């Protein structure tokens, strides 16, 4: 048990949250934000880091990410100020950003969050799109297979 405890302690000491996108890594900015091969004109918005990793497993998205840290939820008392939405609005306002893909879960809270963000980004020059059908209603991204996520990402549509 001691080697496991040491490994967990070492991981806790070395894991950082990326100040650009909200991903976790051992460096800040994270490896995805620093990757020059990625398309810097696209941002994929996800609810949490597990969703980012689910999208990465598809190998279908070659842009950058933005982690919200959850979804809007009136029942749970989570409002826009509790999420990383201001950071997204700032990033999307950059003229280099051409598209923002809203990849929130197909839940009531996920879709409410997506609509709220689409309204907040209406003044940006970037196109705002959402994942296409194929992600089941009530489904969560980190439980879907790579084929479903890949097809949903390829068939995204404007919001």
Image (cartoon, grey):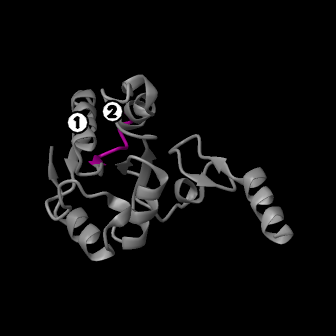
Question: Which residue range is magenta in the image?
Answer: 93-101
Label disc, if present, on residue 18 of the rendered structure: none
The residue wearing badge 2 is 72
Label disc, if present, on residue 112 of the rendered structure: 1
Residue 66 pos. (x, y %):
43, 46
147 left or right of 31 in image: left
**Principal secondary structure, stretch drawn in magenta:** loop
Give the Cα separation between the discs numbered 1 and 2.
7 Å
Seen at 31% across and 57% down, the residue is 140
Residue 98 pos. (x, y %):
29, 46
Closer-to-camera residue (54/63): 54
Name the image quarter holding residue 1.
bottom right
Q: Is residue 96 magenta?
A: yes
Q: Is residue 99 above or below residue 136?
A: above
Q: Is residue 125 above or below residue 56?
A: above
Closer-to-camera residue (74/134): 74
Q: Is residue 70 magenta?
A: no
Seen at 21% across and 64% down, the residue is 152
Seen at 38% across and 49% down, the residue is 46
Helix, strand or loop for disc 1: helix
Residue 61 visible, this orientation: no
35 left or right of 97 in image: right
Helix, strand or loop for disc 2: loop
Residue lying at the far bottom in this picture: please name it: 147
């Amino acid at each position: 048990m001691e080697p496991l405890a040491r490994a967990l302690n070492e991981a806790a000491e070395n894991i950082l949250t990326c100040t650009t996108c909200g991903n976790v890594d051992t460096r800040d900015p994270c490896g995805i934000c620093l990757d020059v091969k990625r398309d810097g004109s696209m941002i994929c918005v996800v609810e949490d880091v597990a969703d980012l990793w689910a999208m990465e497993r598809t190998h279908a998205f070659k842009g950058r990410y933005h982690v919200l840290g959850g979804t809007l939820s009136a029942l749970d008392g989570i409002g826009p100020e509790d999420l990383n939405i201001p950071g997204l609005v700032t990033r999307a306002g950059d003229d280099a950003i051409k598209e923002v893909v809203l990849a929130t879960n197909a839940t009531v809270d996920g879709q409410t969050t997506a609509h709220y963000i689409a309204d907040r980004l209406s003044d940006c020059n970037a196109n705002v799109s959402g994942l296409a059908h194929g992600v089941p209603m009530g489904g969560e991204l980190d439980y879907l297979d790579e084929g479903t996520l890949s097809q949903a990402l390829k068939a995204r549509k404007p919001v």
